[in-house]
């Protein structure tokens, strides 16, 4: 079958090959036919080595499709079911799952070190234990989450990562209060979802911060009350908060420099929410005096910062009610052969989300 493979970490192009096989099918597993997959910034970060990932590998962790084969012992799924791919399946039994923090369950990561594809040349890994830039993938049954009939594959795919991450940061983690002031630094797909989450929560001002003009324009369509470039942020802070700082600042880039900017633009006693996925050798610094004296709450948010299945259901409910716009987040569409164009669009900031149709 066809799949897009990265041969070595650090390369910036994928090779679309037709000699790839999805392996590992057996008890507790399902085989999926992927129909749509989004390109998430984490895929690019895994390719460049910012996020740890063994190679060669197939990127993609934001996908949706149909169940085509069911392993022994799998309950609650049938052949033909429409599902989205959850890259962080909850085991249901560990302390995190029992607390309702399924986004912190590590059981799924045990699979990330096991290759789930192969080629004549050898084993191929899937990103984050999934790998959706492919026609078929074998995953744990817990990674296949049934979706209602009215949710198109391309919308379900977005809910599988970017939308859940961004909405959840505003709703679950920061719990943005009605009437508050918000700044969102980084306005790709996740940042746009954070803006939509802040709007759902009733924020009065939502300032989108991004160096790319097309993303600033997009942010205004999704609920930002104004959009500025990074060097205009200080002025916006002065105008909107009389210099005090925003009630909530979301860092959706994944770099210590932007996290520091976010910290400095958060008011004393306000909330800095870290949403971006960054590197292990990039350290965020806060001195002990400001930490205690300014009482800013630093809240990291992983995959929406709450129960993952509940977050999916909420995203679907908000979308169905017209309270969030997911269709317009898909700015580009390609077939698998166009995956390198999609990567370029993401690197230049031209796209919010590119949907790869399979
Ligand atoms: Zn668990
Ligand atoms: Zn992602």
Image (spheres, rainbow, N blue to C red):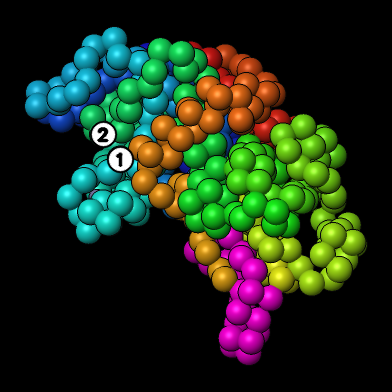
Give me the disc on residue 164.
Answer: none
In this view of the protein, can residue 217 be seen by the observer?
yes
Q: Give the quadrant of residue 339.
A: top right
- Category of crowding for the residue at label 2, using alpha-carbon neighbours closer than 10 angstroms: few (below 14), some (14–19), many (at least 20): many
Q: Using the image, determine if residue 228 lies above or below residue 192.
A: below
Residue 14, quarter of the rendered image: top right
Magenta stretch: includes residue 269: yes
Front residue of 319 and 304: 319
What residue is shown at x 61% (from left), y 16% (from top)? 334
Seen at 84% across and 70% down, the residue is 243
Mark 1 touches mark 2? (CB < 8 Å): yes
User: In the rendered view, does 341 fall on the left or right side of 138?
Assistant: right
Which residues, given as a range, are shown in magenta? Answer: 268-296
Tell me residue 195's x, y (percent): 67, 43
Identify the residue position indicated by label 2 in the image. 142
Q: Is residue 218 magenta?
A: no
State the residue position of label 1.
89
Residue found at x 74% / y 50%: 204
């Amino acid at each position: 079958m066809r799949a897009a493979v990265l041969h070595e970490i650090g390369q910036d192009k994928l090779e679309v090959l037709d000699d790839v096989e999805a392996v590992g099918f057996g008890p507790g597993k399902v085989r999926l036919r992927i129909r749509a997959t989004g390109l998430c910034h984490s895929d690019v970060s895994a390719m460049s080595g910012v996020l740890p990932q063994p190679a060669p590998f197939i990127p993609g962790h934001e996908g949706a499709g149909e169940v085509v084969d069911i392993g022994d012992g799998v309950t609650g799924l049938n052949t033909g079911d429409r599902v989205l791919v959850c890259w962080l399946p909850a085991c249901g039994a560990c302390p995190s799952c029992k607390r309702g923090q399924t986004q912190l369950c590590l059981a799924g990561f045990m699979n990330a070190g096991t290759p789930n594809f192969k080629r004549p040349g050898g084993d191929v890994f899937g990103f984050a234990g999934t790998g959706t830039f492919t026609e078929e993938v074998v995953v744990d049954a817990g990674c296949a989450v049934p979706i209602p009939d009215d949710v198109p594959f391309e919308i379900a795919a977005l809910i599988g990562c970017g939308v859940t991450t961004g909405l959840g940061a505003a709703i679950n983690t920061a719990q943005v209060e009605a009437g508050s002031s918000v700044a969102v630094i980084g306005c790709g797909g996740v940042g746009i979802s954070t803006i939509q989450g802040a709007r759902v929560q009733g924020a009065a001002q939502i300032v989108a911060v991004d160096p790319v003009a097309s993303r600033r324009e997009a942010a205004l369509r999704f609920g930002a009350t104004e959009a500025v470039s990074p060097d205009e942020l200080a002025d916006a802070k002065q105008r909107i908060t009389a210099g005090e700082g925003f009630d909530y600042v979301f860092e959706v880039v994944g770099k210590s420099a932007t996290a520091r900017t976010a910290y400095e633009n958060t008011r004393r006693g306000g909330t800095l929410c870290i949403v971006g996925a960054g590197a292990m050798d990039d350290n965020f610094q806060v001195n002990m005096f400001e930490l205690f004296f300014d009482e800013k709450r630093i809240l990291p948010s992983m995959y929406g910062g709450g129960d993952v299945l509940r977050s999916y259901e909420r995203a679907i409910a908000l979308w169905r009610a017209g309270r969030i716009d997911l269709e317009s987040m898909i700015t580009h569409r390609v077939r698998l052969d166009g995956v390198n164009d999609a990567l370029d669009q993401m690197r230049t900031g031209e796209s919010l989300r590119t949907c790869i149709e399979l």
